[in-house]
Image (cartoon, rainbow, N blue to C red):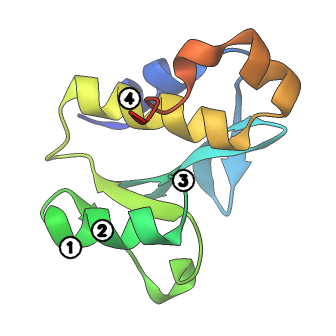
Amino acid sequence: MDLDDARRAALALPEVTERQSWGQPAWFHRNLVARMWDEGRLTVRVEDDGERLALVEQEPALYSTTDHHAGTNLVLIAMDVVDVETLRAHLAESWWWAAPPVLRRRYPHLGPPAEDS
């Protein structure tokens, strides 16, 4: 996967636009949805810091973090490792965590999977 794949997937999400953030391509819906951290890694939102740390521990070839992201819900995805379905799923979930409640209600299918009770 590469920048163009990330761009296509991000811009397919509702009301997402692209602009530069810290000199890198980034996608927003009011709030940051995703941003290229560097040439090979994409920053996305996950539910919380706990999920971020769990992903890094479970699949360190795919997920990473930096001191800059400590205590946040932002994780880095290795673009040369991620497959298209995982990329799209992470971008949809990232969109969900960045979107205001009105859009979450309008697009519930983009949210994280419901947990079984």
Q: Find residue 57 and name its label.
A: 1
Q: In the visual, does 95 lie left or right of 29?
A: left
Residue picked out by circle 4: 89
Q: Whole-percent x and y of residue 69?
A: 53, 77
Q: Is residue 55 above or below residue 3?
A: below
Distance between the alpha carbons at the discs numbered 3 and 1? 16 Å
Could you tell me if the residues under marks 1 and 2 are in contact, i.e. CB atoms within 8 Å? Answer: yes
Amino acid on which the number 2 mark rests in the picture? Ala
Distance between the alpha carbons at the discs numbered 4 and 3? 13 Å
Q: Whole-percent x and y of residue 32?
A: 70, 47
**Sooner in the amino-acid sequence: mark 3 or mark 1:** 3
Residue at point 45%, 21% (across, down): 9
Amino acid on which the number 3 mark rests in the picture? Glu
Residue 40 in view (yes/no): no
**Sooner in the amino-acid sequence: mark 3 or mark 2:** 3
**Callout 3: helix, strand or loop?**
loop
Residue 69 in view (yes/no): yes
In front of the other: 58 or 38: 58
Could you tell me if the residues under marks 3 and 2 are in contact, i.e. CB atoms within 8 Å? Answer: no
Q: Whole-percent x and y of residue 20?
A: 69, 47
In front of the other: 66 or 117: 117
**Sooner in the amino-acid sequence: mark 4 or mark 2:** 2
Q: Find residue 54 and name its label.
A: 2
Q: In the visual, does 88 lie left or right of 86?
A: right
Residue at point 14%, 47% (across, down): 81
In the image, which is nearer the foreground, mark 4 or mark 2?
A: 2
Amino acid on which the number 4 mark rests in the picture? Ala
Residue at point 67%, 63% (across, down): 22
**Callout 4: helix, strand or loop?**
helix
Q: Is residue 62 above or below residue 20?
A: below
Within 10 Å of the Cα at label 3, are there few (<14), some (14-19), or many (20+) other Cα atoms?
some
Q: Find residue 47 and name its label.
A: 3
